Each structure stands twice: as C-alpha cells, then as structure tokens.
Amino acid sequence: MKEKIYDKITTIYLIALVMVLFISNIFFVYQFIRCSVISNGVLVFGGIGLILYLYHIIVTKNIRCWDLLVILIYFFCYLSYLHAFDRRTALFGYYSGREGMLVIYAYYIIFLLSSTLKNDKIKELILLLLTCQSIVQVIYCFLQISGLYFVFKMPIMGLEKYSSGFYSNSNFFGSYISLIVGLWVPIYFFNKKFDIKSYLVLSFLIAGLLSCGTMSALVALIAIICLAIIYYFIKRKNIQGKTFLIKLVTLFVTICIEFLALSYFTESSLVKDTVELKDQVVSVASGEIDDSFGTGRIYIWKQTLKYIPKYFWYGIGIDNFIFLGFESGTFIYDSPLEDNIINKAHNEYLNILATGGIFLFVVYMVIIITIFVKASKDIIKTKKINSLRDSFFFAFCSYLVQAFFNCRMVFVAPLFFMIMGLLVSTIEKE
C-alpha cells in the first residue's frame, strides 16, 4: 500500500517537473522571469524529491549502489565548495546559469527518484509528454527562422538565422533536442514494420535539430544513427534486414532534403558549417589542430587545461569557471580576438574536472560508465527488443555525445538526469 502511494506521488512529481520546466523556459524566453527563478524551481523539486526518496528508503529498507555513488557526489561537491574561489557562486551558481552545488544536488535527487519508477505506462506517458512539448518547440523554431512569425498574433523571440526554441540559445536547444531525437531513433528503427507515424515524428524532430545549426547536436545525431546500425547487428535475429535498410535509406534521404531546404529557404549557414566541421575533423585526424576549431572550443579547452594542475584535487569551485584566470588577470575569452569572458568550458566533462576537481569527475564518470555498461549488457543479453529501454538508452548516449562540445545548463540538465534514472529503472526491472 505504501509503495503504491509512493509510485503515485513520484509519477505526479516527474510529470510536474517536465511541465514546470517547459512553462518556465517559455517565461524565461519572454523575459517574465530570470534564470534564477528556474534554478530555484529546480531546488524546490530537489527538496521535495529528497523527502520522497528518504520515504522510499524507509519503506523498502534498501540501499542501492546508486545511493552510495550519489552520496560520494554530494561529499565531493561539498569539498569543492569548501575550497571554492567564490563560495557564494559555488553554492548558488554563477548568475548567467545558476548551476551551483544545491542545484547539482537536486539533479541527483531527480535521478534517484526516476530510477525507482517501475510502471512502464507512466514512462510511456512521460515520453509522450516530452514529444508533444518538443513538437511545439520545433514549430516555434520554424517561426523563428522562416520569417512567417506574423502568422501568429504574438511576438516571436530569438529571430536569428538559427533557431533556439524556448531556450534563448541555439546550443541549449541543441542539447535538448538531441535528447528527444535520441528517444525516437529506436522507436523508428526497431519497429517490425515501417511505421509512418514514428517516421514523421522523427523527421520533424530532426528538422528542428538541424534548424538550430548546432554542430554538437549534428554530431550526436550521426553518433546515434551509427549506434542504431550497431544495435541492428546485435539484434539482427529480431530485426528484418531489408526493413531496417529501407528505414535507414529513407531517413538519410529525408535528412538530406531537410538539410538542403533549411539552407535554401532560410538564412542558415548549415552547409558551410558542416563542410567546415568535416574539414576540421580531417585536420584533427591528421594532427593539425588550430585554436579556431569548433568555433573556438579548441582554444577554450587548451586554456582550461592550463589551470587543471592548480585546481586538480577540488577544482576552483562549482560553477566558478569564470574565475580560473582571475588571480593572474588572464581570463579565458571566447577566442583570442574576442572580449567575451567564458564562464563554461564548452565541454561538460572538462568543466566538471576544472570546477569540481578530480574526485567529483571520477565519481561522475563511474556513474555514467556503469549505466552505459549495464544497459549495453542488458541489450546484448535479452532476446526481445525493449522499446522503452532502447529509447532511454539512445537519449542517454545522444546527450553524452553532444556534452563533449557543450555546456550543462539548468534549462536542460534535469531532463537528462530524469531520463538517466528512467533508464536505470528499466534495466533493473529487466
């Protein structure tokens, strides 16, 4: 009886989280609220979630490995806070992102709660809710870049050559849409028949991904399509090769058409950016690396690595990245020629190492790698195709790929930790 009550409350909690984040992002884009309001909202969910999860532990009398790993995360975050350059920033976050220690604590509570949800119907409902929200966002993206914003009697924010949805920044939207596209890639590929509905949904979402012009999202898309091919060879006894090939070719042609249409009918520089990305990859593979590669990311990474030895053990402090060069007066700028000071490493893993230190980085990687290995083993071991597990796994992998070139932000990160938890709950149920 107590577990049923817990399940119902957890379901309400997760649905409320998804809805509140969606509405809050809209309010933020239209400047009705500040980023700190979204951050404080996540803190509220973290506090409620902590009470719920402690209740779950008391009822089940079960401590899992995830609990111990999260306790380690909390401990090393606190050590980083104690040694932080600016403790207030470490606690509440830098003003432009507000991703301090308390918010990170909330992320992991969301993960733990999600990892206890066993009801597949509720997981399907959450997937549907995320999909519906994403479709609304992609429509908004097209209004941002098409010049058709006058169709609706309302102001459209972010009228740029690249879309940003309800995230005010195309990179943030790229992180978000990478997650959602990841959810739908296995649904499309691993149905027994060619399902027109999943094809249309995935094609529409990919068009939104391309519209934001974020190369990290494009790399993530390529990676999860390659992952789908690998998955096919693992499960080829359960998947018809001819049907899979038709789906693969159809999706490739569709992406090419969307790619060209966006380049022709909008001001997008998608073709130019993609060619530049390809040339940079070739150059890196041949050992030629320039600071301008990755829109200046190589320069930012190289500058960040200079400070790692100084702050190796505890980092400079959670969300204190902007202060890395403060003492010497040599801040990390957007590029050698710009005056914009960088407050994130534009690489989630490097950012955790620089701000949280080696202990926090190692425990985070242990969590990520453990989940990846457990999910991979489950896919290989089980004979049947589990569509929910596969959706969460592909979304999980998609986010991790784009995170190599992007920043973690409070706008998107709670959804990633929720999906990560749902993946754990699915494979543990298996």
Image (cartoon, rainbow, N blue to C red):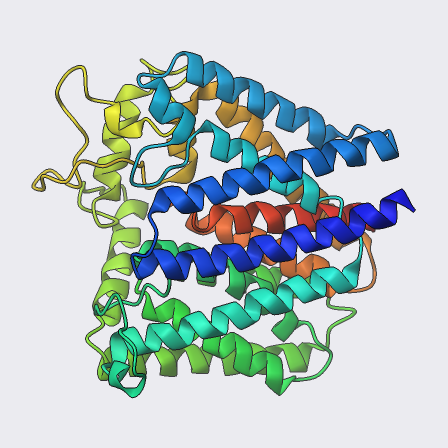
Pinpoint residue 140: horizontal percent, then vertical percent.
37, 74
User: Count of labels shown?
Assistant: 0
The answer to whether residue 167 of the structure is visible from this angle is no
Q: Residue at x 20, y 22 (%)?
A: 325
Q: Residue sitting at 11 percent across and 38 percent down?
A: 336
- Where residue 45 sits in the image (x, y, percent)? 58, 42
Q: Would you place residue 157 above or below residue 297 in this image?
A: below
Q: Residue furthest front?
A: 32
Asked whether 272 or 405 is in front, the reply is: 405
User: Where is residue 331, by image quadrant?
Assistant: top left
Q: Using the image, determine if residue 128 lies above or below residue 332.
A: below
- Is 29 placed above or below 354 here? below
Foreground residue among 32 and 408:
32
Relative image position of residue 288 (x, y in whole percent): 22, 43
Indicate the position of residue 155 as horizontal and vertical percent values: 26, 74
From this viewpoint, which residue is outermost toward the left?
A: 337
Quarter-of-image position of residue 28 = bottom left
Q: Is 319 displayed left or right of 225 in the figure? A: left
Q: Residue at x 64, y 23 (%)?
A: 71
**In which quarter of the view is residue 32 placed?**
bottom left
Asked if residue 244 lies left or right of residue 240, the reply is: left
Does residue 258 appear in this view? yes
User: In the image shown, does 98 or 266 lie closer to the viewer?
Assistant: 98
| Closer to the camera in the image, 155 or 266 | 155
Q: Is residue 182 above or below residue 79?
A: below
Which residue sits at x=80%, y=31%? 57
